[in-house]
Amino acid sequence: LRISVLVSGGGTNLQAVMDSIESGKIKDAEIACIISSNPKAFALERGKKRHIKTFVVDKGQYPAMSLRTKALLSALQEARTDLVVLAGYMSILEPELIKAYSGRIINIHPSLIPKYCGKGFFGQRVHEAVIAAGEKESGATVHFVDEGVDTGPIILQQRVPVLAGDTPEELGARVLAVEHQILTEAINKVIAEL
Ligand code: GRF
């Protein structure tokens, strides 16, 4: 199965997927390409180290969203993508792309969806909001991507405790470790069902 991974930042989720393929935790799959919305994303370095094809599709080169969608679609098609994995991807996908890969796009989100998700809830902001709300637990979710933001059918979730005095960074690190685990498990689940 050919998996294309969309990234924007540090790429620790990408790294977890590459490591799982390398270790055999994920079988019958390979990373077809990595596409970043950010030319400076460290995720790109992680992919290059593994000799994986990388693309940058960003506002700098493609100011109009419609041009970015066309560039994304051609990169995904060139890579003969079977499954699209959004891993720390910080850009919205247009309906045209979601339709083209309907049922074959998954996303990892650092909260227990439907809590603390949707527009504005990404990265550290999620953990700040969870702590500010006095939640006793948080977690991570892998879900199918539909035309909403963080609204598609849930594939897997895993809880983590929010500890007294947690900073957003401490909670974020605890959640990120779980993201890495459930993303691998979710990919195996989807591969088995595709
Ligand atoms: C993290 O906030 C993570 O929770 C979310 O995207 C951000 C970066 O992840 N999924 P990564 O290290 O780039 O995979």
Image: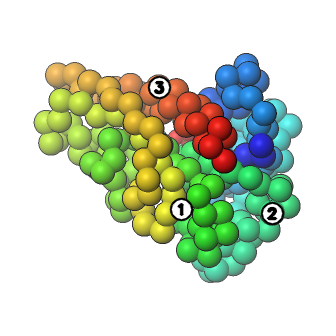
Circles 3, 1 touching at the beta carbon (< 8 Å): no
Locate residue 79 relative to residue 190 in the image: left or right: right
Looking at marks 2 and 3 on the same chain, the residue that comes earlier in the sequence is marked by 2
Q: Position of residue 119 (x, y in %)?
A: 36, 62
Name the secondary structure under disc 1.
Answer: loop
Find the residue positioned furthest to the front: 193
Residue tagged 1 = 91
Of residues 29 and 50, the one nearer the viewer is: 29
**Residue at (69% x, 28% y) in the render:** 26
Residue 91 sits above or below residue 143 on the image: below
**Residue at (71% x, 66% y) in the render:** 72
Looking at marks 2 and 1 on the same chain, the residue that comes earlier in the sequence is marked by 2
Q: Residues within 10 Å of mark 2 (few under 14, many from 20)?
A: few
Question: Between tags 2 and 1, which lies in front?
Answer: 2
**Residue at (67% x, 69% y) in the render:** 100
Of residues 181 and 144, the one nearer the viewer is: 144
- Please tell me the numbered disc located at residue 146: none
Of residues 75 and 104, the one nearer the viewer is: 104
- Please tell me the numbered disc located at residue 177: 3
> Does residue 56 appear anywhere in the picture?
yes
Q: Amino acid at mark 3?
A: Ala
Q: Position of residue 193 (x, y in %)?
A: 62, 43
State the quadrant of the N terminus: top right
Find the residue positioned furthest to the left: 134
Q: Amino acid at mark 1?
A: Ser
**Residue at (47% x, 48% y) in the render:** 143
Residue tagged 2 = 77
Residue at mark 3 to residue at mark 1: CA–CA distance: 23 Å
Q: Position of residue 182 (x, y in %)?
A: 50, 31
Circles 2, 3 touching at the beta carbon (< 8 Å): no
Q: Amino acid at mark 2?
A: Gln
Residue at mark 2 to residue at mark 3: CA–CA distance: 31 Å
